[in-house]
Image (cartoon, helix red, strand yellow):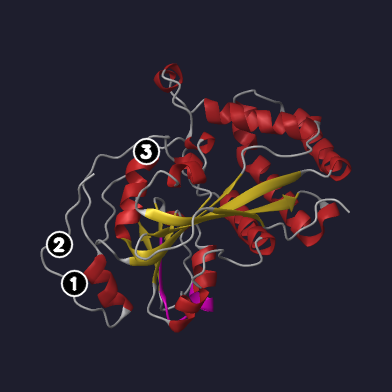
Amino acid sequence: MTTTASSTPPTTPTTFTSFLKAKWRSSTTKVLKPWKPIPNTRDYIEKSWVQHNALNMAFDGDTMAPVAQSLLSGGCEVLDIGCGAGFWSMDMATKYPLSYFIGIDVDKNVFPNITMQKNLLFQRVDIMTTPLPYENDTFDYVFIRSMLDTLPDEGWDSVLQEIVRVMKRGAYLECVEPYANLFDTGPAMSTILGLIDSSANKRISATQLLNQQLPAVYNPWPNRLAPLSTLQSMRIHHTHTPIGKYGGALGSLMVQYWERTIKASSQDWILTKAISEKDLDTLHQEMLAEIETHETYMAWYSVVAQKKGYNGPAIVIEDYDTQAISQ
């Protein structure tokens, strides 16, 4: 895809407002259809908060990219794509007050309405409308979390090209995502996962099924980033998050995560008669018991890649399990 920068070079920003005015641009390209509706319920926001705190514990911090020193030094511009309620952006803006953060999401209703840090801004931006509304070489660091299943598989091709375009040379891209499957599940959790999959499949059109166009979750981030000639030094970190009190504070958080996942979808399941309210309550209680006996857990990964600008190492894959799953 060919994009053109503004004919007038932006002035050097002296404040966050002037930085934004210098970097904002228009966007008119046709919008892609998302795989799933955009949630803005209280359950979704609470689930996002729980997930944010759990992953902070699992990865021992908010970022795996080697950007801490640059962010502390100040002057860096960071983009949080699909920021939702903005928990990651707010934490980072507080931790690194001398750098600038922009959180973007298609649904502005989930943005926080509290007084925010002066170095943080939330904007309604639909990443499915390309080009992204920023100039070339704008950001030092781009962060994406739990976004892979929000676009059709082919949609990410153009979006990734746009993300790389707005990154500076040497900038880092970090994508955090869960693996598709849960591990050591029992029958109750397996039934719940089946209900979730059934709801997702109903949102895929007959034409997409006929053409075998599967959701992007089946093509994970490392596979998507590796072919991009503009990126280098890809590093993948793995971690596990136990689901259950057996996993301590982290495991208890993940129980809350799954309880809110169930609650957010329960009305849809009951209305479509996928399951009765009574049976769902029973299933829920069985799930809470079996995750302890089976020691169920999720696996997550963070993939970090750098936009070419200087020589770096080849692909490095390492395990980063900070929480023991079995005693």
The residues colored magenta run 93-103
Which is nearer the N-term, disc 3 or disc 2?
2
Q: CA distance from mark 3 to mark 2?
A: 25 Å
Residue at which label 2 appears = 6
Q: CA distance from mark 2 to mark 1?
A: 8 Å
Q: Residues within 10 Å of mark 2 (few under 14, many from 20)?
A: few
297 or 129, nearer to the observer:
297
| Vertical arrangement, residue 12 with respect to residue 269, above or below | below
Residue at which label 3 appears = 155
Q: Residue at x 41, y 79 (%)?
A: 118
Q: Whole-percent x and y of residue 222?
A: 51, 46
Question: Label 2 amino acid?
Answer: Ser
| Vertical arrangement, residue 134 with respect to residue 257, above or below | below
Q: Look at the numbered discs 2 and 1 and tell me whether their residues touch, using CB distance below 8 Å.
A: yes
Q: Residues within 10 Å of mark 1 (few under 14, many from 20)?
A: some
In the rendered structure, find residue 28 and report the number of the disc placed on it: none
| Vertical arrangement, residue 99 with respect to residue 112, above or below | below
